[in-house]
Image (cartoon, rainbow, N blue to C red):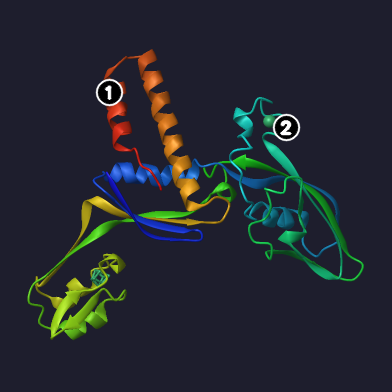
Amino acid sequence: MDIQIIKEENNFLSFIIKDVTSSYINTLRRIMNVEVPIMAIDEINFIVNDSALYDEIIAHRLGLIPLKTDLQSYELKEKCTCNGVGCAKCQLTLTLKTKGPCTVYASDLKSQDPKVIPVYPKIPITKLSEGQSIELEATAKLGLGKEHVKFSPGLIYYQAYPEIKLKDVSNPEKIKEVCPTHVFEVENNKLTVKNLLNCDLCMACVEATQDDSIQVKGSKTDYIFYIESFGQLTPKEIMTTAINVFDDKLDELTKKMKEGEESKISKITDKIKIKKKVKAE
Ligand code: SF4
Ligand SMILES: [Zn+2]
């Protein structure tokens, strides 16, 4: 397996990953989407709400506010030593107390833990008129995307690495214009590939030629992977956490199979493990 970073910027990471199967890459995507723990508000106790919005609407808005997540200090409630009762290791409190007239923003939430705060302070929650006020106590916890989308760490997707072959293209200028992602350039009246990684395999160029002078296909072993974090974790944290989760799952599978039918499956999982030693450096 070979990995090359294409772009790393704020909450965005893209990289090329080579020599993997489609099932491997899709497993990685699914684990990142639904198995990486994320902190989000889960319960709210409303003390006062004079705003025009119902408690339920405000609760929904609060739940979707991305919170900076500290995976070193917190544990999933189900795995916590408190057995899911709720303690300082698996949950924390955020309070909100404001009087109108004003717009109430995410930054008005006061967190018990300065490391767990809203990622985007300017997210509006509601508006208060003169004489109106809001007061509430919210409990945030770690959760998984498979439980609720508010625990999702970002947009994670991939596409096959594009492979383009050109052979005496008769109408280079037209093909250059047809491509919506500006993959081609024309040099000395000849079509050339300038930005291969821009190709999203839409096939517009192939359809426009009506012969076989352009061949486009997606690789079966190489992929371009994208992680757009919502900000709770960095893309690298999402990646490394997902790999650890993948490891744990394989260990668990091996253990279960050993308990049952013994070694056949453990050999298979060991092989997969060797393949997936990815370092997101
Ligand atoms: S397949 Fe689509 S994106 Fe790729 S080069 Fe052709 S027109 Fe451009
Ligand atoms: Zn606990």
Q: Quadrant of ligand 1?
A: bottom left
Within 10 Å of disc 1 (Cα), the crowding (few <14, some 14-19, many 20+) is: few
- x and y percent of residue 42 in the render? 68, 44
- x and y percent of residue 139 in the render? 73, 43
SS class of the residue under badge 2? loop
Q: Is mark 2 within 8 Å of ligand 2?
A: yes
Task: Name the foreground residue: 234 vs 260.
Answer: 234
- Residue at image x 19%, y 82%? 186
- Residue at image x 62%, y 40%? 142
Amino acid tagged 1: Lys
Amino acid tagged 2: Cys
Q: Earlier in the sequence, mark 1 or mark 2?
A: 2
- Is residue 175 visible in the rendered image? The answer is no
Residue extending furthest toward the right:
131
Residue extending furthest toward the left:
168
Q: Residue 143 shows which numbered tag? A: none
**From the viewer's perspective, is 235 left or right of 64?**
left
- Residue at image x 36%, y 19%? 257
Name above or below for residue 84 compared with residue 21.
above
- Residue at image x 36%, y 15%? 258
SS class of the residue under badge 1? helix
- x and y percent of residue 197 in the render? 29, 65
- Whether residues under marks 1 and 2 lie with C-beta atoms below 8 angstroms apart, the answer is no
The residue that label 2 is drawn on is 87
**From the viewer's perspective, is 31 left or right of 122?**
left
- x and y percent of residue 106 in the render? 72, 60
The residue that label 1 is drawn on is 267
